[in-house]
Amino acid sequence: MILNRAPSPVDKLALAVVHAPERASFNALPAGAREESLRVLLQTAADAGVSLVATEPEGDGERWLGQAWPFPSPFQVTVQTVSITDGVDRVEARARRSLERLGLPRGDVLLVSSADDLAGAEGRALWDRLEGLKTRGLFKRIGFRARLEDGPALLARRFQPDVVQLPLNLLDQRAQRTGVLAELAGLGVSVHADSIFADGALFISGEALPPEMARHAHALSRIRRRLAEARLDPMQAALAYAHGLPEVSAAIASVASSAELRAVIAAANAPTPDLDWSAFQLEPATATAAGPRRVSSAA
């Protein structure tokens, strides 16, 4: 039986534009051509109904996006904080600066970029600053990014965020299988899933695998074979799994070009078989041993 996992899967699709030189060819373009390339990418997203864009403060990505938004912009934007290393004043100032660089009067979500910052001595002071920015209307919602090992549900009970961003993908389903997603949903927290393509591990094989994943080559080959038997390509399967989780409100796909985005949108809209997705995960012990930064790093 063929089913679509949601009435409109693109409703859950969020976009993170990759600016890393090894993937984003527009980095090498002259300023005008780079802006036009980004403009085409963003317009493609808008035309498809993608409404959320996730950003990071590093490099020039925020500024480049700010120069390329469609007008009027149809996007809600997620902003991340810088490290608390230089103090909470710096974190607040940089969050405000992010909005300026993006050319936006306000953002949708402000996320603490690392749960470690909340677990430290200044965690409460940091959260108070985020709440202040929310109260002033600069951000509609606040939250944090976390790994499963950070205890996101415990942190959510302590800080009562609006949003938690977690690594979650077909290979590493622990957040679902251990009940963390259900617990967050019970607390009224929106979950944004990142790393949905498992750092590209679903798309590469054999000698091309990074060293830390090479020992999983046989398991990955078996998973790809099962996907082929189900007539699913890895991208389609990864998106179908993430979009099929009722607790997940946004699945963040990283793209470096409008061509990549079109492929993601096509895969998201493709009909998928009604499958037992648990058969496609790496063994829980394997996923834990590999660590979320390896199996589930942003991709």
Image (cartoon, grey):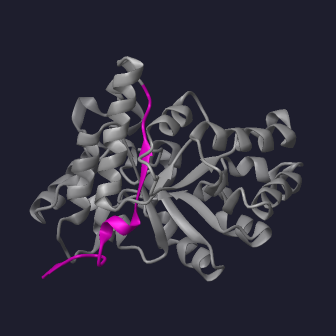
- Residue 200 position within the rendered picture, expressed as x and y whole percent measured from the top left: 33, 42
Q: Is residue 45 left or right of residue 3?
A: right
| Left or right: 34, with 131 as reference point | left
Q: Is residue 20 above or below residue 111?
A: above
Would residue 176 appear left or right of 30 to someone viewing this image?
right
Image x and y of residue 76, in percent = 52, 58
Q: Determine the residue positioned at 68% across, 47% down.
A: 114
Number of disc labels: 0
Image point (33%, 70%), residue name: 278
Look at the image and say whether residue 6 sits in the magenta stretch. Answer: yes
Residue 284 shows up from this direction: yes
Residue 126 falls inside the magenta stretch: no
Q: Nearer the viewer, residue 133 or 213?
A: 133
Name which quarter of the figure residue 109 lies in: bottom right
Q: Which residues are magenta?
A: 1-20
Q: Nearer the viewer, residue 284 or 293?
A: 293
State which quadrant residue 170 falls in: bottom left
Residue 89 percent coordinates (x, y): 86, 40
Q: Position of residue 269 (x, y in %)?
A: 22, 65
User: Is residue 195 shown left or right of residue 157?
Assistant: left
